[in-house]
Amino acid sequence: MIYHVGALIRLNELGFLSKVQEIASVSGGSITSGKLAYAWSALRFEGGRAINLIEEVANPLIRFASVGVDVRAALLGLLPRRTAADGVQEAYDRHLFHGANLQEIPDTPRFTFMTTNLQTGSGWRFAKAYAADFRVGRVDQPRLLLSCVVAASSAFPPVLSPVRLKFDPGTVKPMEGTDLHRPPFTEIAVLTDGGVYDNLGLERIWKRCRTILVSNAGRNTPEIGSPTGRWIGQMFRTLGLVQQQAENSRKRILLGLHNLGQRKVAYWRSF
């Protein structure tokens, strides 16, 4: 979350933030993106730079970083008829989004919050115009709370996941190619962190944009000279490697598009 605050500040200093047309996010990046979407109408741009970005976006996120959310949410999630995701959503709404829903964010730039559908293995994407899973269908102009969507996008498994969204009958419309447009898929979505399906949040962006800026707050799976032979350690190590290879594959495709001149790409990451 904080890593991407720094990225936004730098993009604004360079005058690029005011030119962005599409912003897609996953995981902790969706918290930052969600706050930017919430505050966008309050930003005052002068000379291509938002002169109040720090006050409207950066400072609230920095303050939120000192709030203990995950442990409290996990413990309260042990109560009957309550989940850890409920606590995360409540914290997001109380500290960052104050009851706003997707219809209250701007049309431009277009904000897309990516999640992973545990039922289908595909991605659910949420935006102002529509929410969709290409295997299930589409919800036009969803009025979901911004806190709920961000909680789903950042629902880090297994403790803070899943987020369950229920749809009224007829809400999810079929699209061309949908093969799971039927109950229970059209009645409920069981969602986890968007980074599980697309760790860089690229799927929406690289199909539509010629210039792509990628801010990656993740880290590479570290080298280990003597990996453990215990099955729990092996399991976590293997899952980390699988996730890393999926990310590397998307990165290779992205940079390949850049090298072929089909896209202009800037990529930076934490270490």
Image: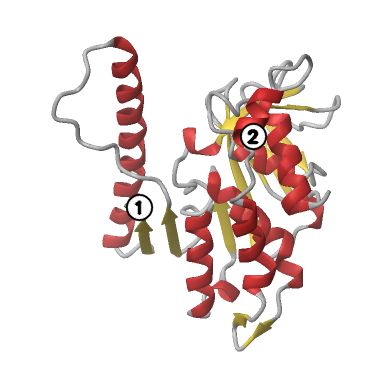
Q: Please, what secondary structure does the residue beneath circle 1 have? A: helix
Please name the residue shown 76% across and 52% down the image.
97
Q: Is residue 69 left or right of residue 254?
A: right
Q: Does 269 sit above or below residue 16? A: above
Q: Which residue is mark 1?
A: 254
- Residue 19 is drawn in which quadrant? bottom right
Looking at the picture, tell me which residue is in the foreground, 215 or 114: 215
Q: Residue furthest top?
A: 231
Q: Is residue 65 left or right of residue 43?
A: left
Q: Mark 2 belongs to which amino acid?
A: Glu
Camera-side mark, 1 or 2: 1
Q: Which residue is mark 2?
A: 176
Q: Mark 1 belongs to which amino acid?
A: Leu
Q: Residues within 10 Å of mark 2 (few under 14, many from 20)?
A: few
Image coordinates for residue 95, horizontal then vertical, percent: 74, 51
Is residue 90 in sight in this rendering? yes
Image coordinates for residue 136, horizontal then vertical, percent: 66, 27
